[in-house]
C-alpha cells in the first residue's frame, strides 16, 4: 500500500485541472505514486514531483523541466492552489518574501522585493544579536524591507513570511518580551508604509520564498555584513 496516495492524488488532480486551464497538460497514473510523492509528466517539458509531508500537512514541488516559459506558468499555478499568488504590477502593491537563518553562531536575514514578477531589490545581511538565533533574522528582514520602502517612497507592501511572530508581534497578538521583538514592534508601529501580512508555509515549492531563504542562509554562512 502506497503511503498517503489519497492525499497526493487529490492534490495532483487539482493541480492537473488548474494547469489545463493554462493549456498545459500533465498526466499521471497508478504507477506514478510512491510513498509521500507522485510524479506528473508534461507533454513538452519534463516531469513534476509533488511531495507530501504529513507531520505539517504540506505539499512541496520539485521540477525537472526544460521549457522556461512553461516552468513559469507551472510555478504561478502552484502558487494559486497554495493561496500564495502575488499582486500584479498594475496594482502598485509590492510583494516581499522574508526569512531568517542561524548557522554556526551567525544570524542572517534575507528579503526579496517584487513588483509583479519583477525583482526590485534583494536585501541580506547579518545582525550582531544572535541570542534568539534565526528569529532575530526573521524580524530584521522585515525592518530592512520597511527601510527600503520608506527610502523608495513605496506606499503599500504585502509581507509574505513563514515565522508567525512576524505578524503576531506586529499586530499585538503576541506580546513582545525581549529587546529584539520590542525594537521590531516599535519600528513597525511607527512606519507609514501600509502593510498587508500573509503567512506562507516554508519549503512548499514557492520559488520566491525559497529565494529569501537562500539569501538569509548565504548571509549567515559568509557573514555578509
Image (spheres, helix red, strand yellow):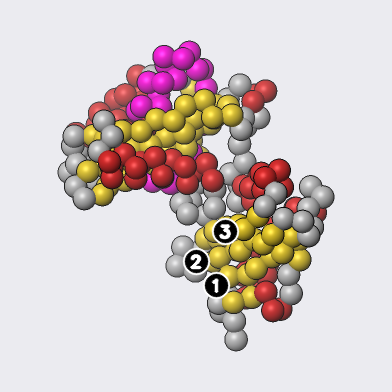
Residue 38 at what x, y percent from top left?
A: 63, 70
Q: Is residue 118 visible?
A: yes
Find the distance from the CA under tag 2 to the CA under tag 1.
7 Å
Q: Residues within 10 Å of mark 1 (few under 14, many from 20)?
A: some
Query: Closer to the N terminus: mark 2 or mark 1?
Result: 1
- Tell us which disc is closer to us: 1 or 3: 3
Find the distance from the CA under tag 1 to the CA under tag 3.
13 Å
Q: Which residue lies at the image location 49% right of the left edge and 66% below the top edge? A: 53
* Residue carrying label 3: 62
Q: Is residue 122 shown left or right of residue 85? A: left
Give above or below for 8 relative to 76: below
Give above or below for 141 relative to 31: above
Check whether the beta carbons of the residues at disc 2 and disc 1 lie within 8 A of each other. Answer: yes
Query: Closer to the N terminus: mark 3 or mark 2?
Result: 2
Find the distance from the CA under tag 3 to the CA under tag 2.
14 Å
For mark 1, give the secondary structure. Answer: loop
- Which numbered disc covers residue 36? 1
Q: Which residues are magenta?
A: 143-167
Q: Is residue 224 shown left or right of residue 131? A: right
Residue 142 at what x, y percent from top left?
A: 38, 31
Q: Residue furthest front?
A: 66
Amino acid at each position: 500500500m502506497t503511503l498517503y496516495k489519497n492525499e497526493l492524488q487529490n492534490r495532483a488532480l487539482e493541480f492537473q485541472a488548474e494547469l489545463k486551464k493554462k493549456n498545459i497538460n500533465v498526466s499521471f497514473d497508478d504507477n506514478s505514486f510512491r510513498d509521500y510523492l507522485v510524479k506528473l509528466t508534461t507533454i513538452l517539458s519534463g516531469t513534476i514531483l509533488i511531495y507530501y509531508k504529513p507531520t505539517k500537512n504540506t505539499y512541496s514541488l520539485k521540477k525537472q523541466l526544460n521549457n522556461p516559459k512553461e516552468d513559469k506558468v507551472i510555478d504561478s499555478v502552484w502558487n494559486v492552489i497554495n493561496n500564495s499568488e502575488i499582486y500584479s504590477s498594475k496594482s502598485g502593491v509590492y510583494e516581499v518574501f522574508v526569512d531568517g537563518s542561524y548557522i554556526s553562531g551567525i544570524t542572517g536575514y534575507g528579503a526579496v522585493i517584487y513588483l509583479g514578477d519583477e525583482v526590485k531589490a534583494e536585501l541580506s545581511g547579518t545582525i550582531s544579536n544572535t541570542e534568539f538565533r534565526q528569529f532575530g533574522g526573521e524580524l530584521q528582514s522585515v525592518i530592512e524591507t520597511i527601510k527600503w520602502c520608506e527610502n523608495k517612497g513605496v506606499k503599500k507592501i504585502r509581507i509574505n513570511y513563514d515565522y508567525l511572530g512576524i505578524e503576531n508581534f506586529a499586530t499585538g497578538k503576541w506580546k513582545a518580551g525581549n529587546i529584539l521583538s520590542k525594537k521590531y514592534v516599535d519600528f513597525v508601529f511607527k512606519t507609514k508604509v501600509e502593510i498587508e501580512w500573509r503567512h506562507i508555509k516554508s519549503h512548499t515549492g514557492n520559488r520566491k520564498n525559497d529565494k529569501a531563504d537562500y539569501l538569509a542562509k548565504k548571509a549567515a554562512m559568509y557573514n555578509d555584513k
